[in-house]
Image (tube, rainbow, N blue to C red):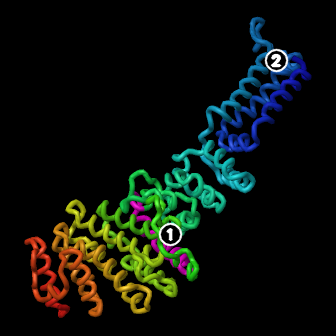
Amino acid sequence: MDINGWLTVITVFTAIFALIPRADLVLSFYRIKPIEKRGVFFIVVVLIPYLIFFPSIVSRFTFLKCFTYDWGFKPSTIAFALFYFSFFWLIARLFWVIPQEKTTEKSIAYYVELLNEQPFEEFFKLFAKYTSTSGIENQWNVYKQLIFQPKFLRGIVITHASFLLQFWKQFSNEKDFQTVFRLFLENENSAYYMEIKEHWNTYSLLDDKPFLNTVLRDNLQQSIHNGLLQVYSDYVSNLLVAQYDKASIYNQPHYYTRIREDEGYDLPLYYHILFIGFLYSSAIENKVDISGISHRYTNMQSIYSNIVEGIINNIDTTQVNDKAEYPTNYHWLIAEMFSLIENWLTTFSDKKYFSKNSSYVSFIPFSFSLCMNELYKGFNRGKITQRFLNARIYYNMLSDYFSHRTNDEMKTSIEEEVIQRIPKEHLKPIFDFALDEKFEMHFSDLVDENYQMINAEELKVLKRLRKFLAKNNLA
């Protein structure tokens, strides 16, 4: 083959490479080992030209004839074979045997360039092709420069949350964790909202929800250490401030949807209320005592009560129907918080989860009491009715106190943290309602020890309550 023939061959092969996307070529080149690059360079630049011009060279340096054989291949044939081999080696490296060489700062810089130039989905497809989970974990500090690019994180949160979940343990400092978690809170299409909505019929964390399980079960202690509650509290506080509007959806009368799973999910605040519910139910079910976790940013006992306080401030009383069970959506959200605390109580009281040395013994009733304190304040401002107070404290706490399934340790805690803190002006209305609902009797009957048609189990708890009230000058 003469030189013109070779030029034709080279042109054809170059045209083939021109059809391959530039990004693939560049990324493959970055990952190929130096020894391979040097080998191909030597073959293409030195060996092949040497073989092409070998007849001319051997005519000048006759001693090279000793390396030739009459029955051997022509030098031009060998040159073409080497050229062909090099071409297919490059093709294989691009599409079949993708190089596993360590990623360099230079290749990360190129990824960032591509990220800014291409639509995110196109970029991520290319990125996934040339990276592996183990590779990212082994070189986290290198890949972190790309992963924490704002465009990368925003795109990942919306469409590829599972990618981030693989590396959740890598978000081991407050700044990194809070940056990532905040993005899930701020995007209504993120896995945070999608997975919470799929819990419409339960207050316990479902096993098939990867984001929530990663944050609230597998890495719960790490999440709290890194300021999960700080980010959450700030976000919810800002949300409540933004909803300080008499005409907002939260101040509209609550309605029951025909499809149960849709109820409440038109209220963004509802998602965040459920999230804290799942946090504690997960901790209780996995026997994680949160009191032993560093939480210097937020008083964990007052998470719900702070929300109740913000809600009370926002409630508009001018058009409230006092006779309705939930005069506004705000009232319904308050009731949901109390229901979630009750769920913590019933779950923790189960023999499978209960421990008398756990902080939950006092934590759960005290958290409930803090929320009730905000309702008492709301009553004084004309935003909460006595009927609403009665319902919350009975259905979400006293009903469990009266139950034989609640052990003595929890009953003692309820007495000290909830009952003892009831303002005297509310004591009689609350117990008139509770005792009538449970035993068909009045508070005066309890004070006078007038127990009629009461079985032995019920009599035991009533005498216990009567004794506690009398000891604390409440009866």
Q: Residue at x 60, y 57 (%)?
A: 147
Q: In this view, does 97 lie above or below 214?
A: above
User: Which residue, given by chain and number where applicable, does mark 2 sit on?
Assistant: 76
Q: What amino acid type should be assigned to the residue bearing mark 2?
A: Ser
Compared to 390, does 471 lie above or below?
Answer: below
For badge 1, the amino acid type reads: Glu
Q: Where is the C terminus found, in terms of image quarters?
A: bottom left
Does residue 218 belong to the magenta stretch?
A: yes
Magenta span of residues: 216-241
Q: Which label sits on residue 397?
A: none
> Is residue 417 visible from the viewing direction of this image?
no
Residue 174: numbered disc: 1
Q: Please identify the quadrant where the N terminus is shown.
A: top right
**Dot 1 lies on which element?**
helix
Is residue 384 one of those drawn in magenta? Answer: no
Sequence-wise, the earlier of marks 2 and 1 is 2
Q: Where is residue 357 in the image (x, y as percent from the top left)?
A: 21, 71
Q: Which residue is drawn at 69% across and 44% down?
A: 27
* Secondary structure predominantly adopted by residues drawn in magenta: helix
Coordinates of residue 427 in the picture (x, y in percent): 26, 88
Work out whether 28 lies above or below 87.
Answer: below
Relative to 155, does residue 345 appear above or below in the rendering? below
